Amino acid sequence: MMKTDPAIKRTRDARRRISASVADDPAKMVEYYIEMQKRFGARLRRGPTDGQEGDGGAAEQGLPAAARKDAPG
């Protein structure tokens, strides 16, 4: 049996708690992470293409309007 890295275990435990807090609903998880990004965005590390064309954002991925955060449902 492989020994689990403590940092990976903490990360997995945190993800499980977050998932449980939104009843394992993927749409609610996305809302949660978007809210966290708004609240703590200044602390996030930005990648070399963040916010630039070609960074893999929702519009570039061709996601339908129903997949957006503000979609009804």
Image (cartoon, helix red, strand yellow):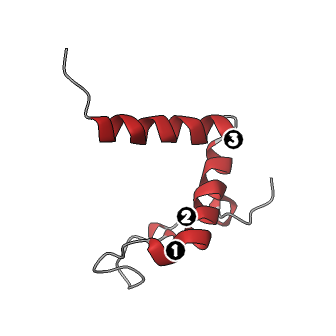
| Quadrant of the rendered image containing residue 46 | bottom left
| Quadrant of the rendered image containing residue 54 | bottom left
Secondary structure under tag 3 reads loop
Which comes before the other along the chain, label 1 or label 3? 3
Secondary structure under tag 1 reads helix
Position of residue 45 measured from the top left corner of the image (x, y, whole percent): 36, 73
Q: Is residue 4 left or right of residue 60?
A: left
Label 3 sits on residue:
22
Residue 64 visible from this viewpoint: no
Residue 39 visible from this viewpoint: yes
Q: Residue at x 36, y 34 (%)?
A: 9
- Name the mark nearer the viewer: 2 or 3: 3
Q: Residue at x 25, y 34 (%)?
A: 5
Residue situated in front as seen by the camera: 67 or 37? 37
Which comes before the other along the chain, label 2 or label 3? 3
Q: Quadrant of the N terminus?
A: top left
Label 2 sits on residue:
63
Real-space Cα distance between discs 2 and 1?
23 Å
Label 1 sits on residue:
41
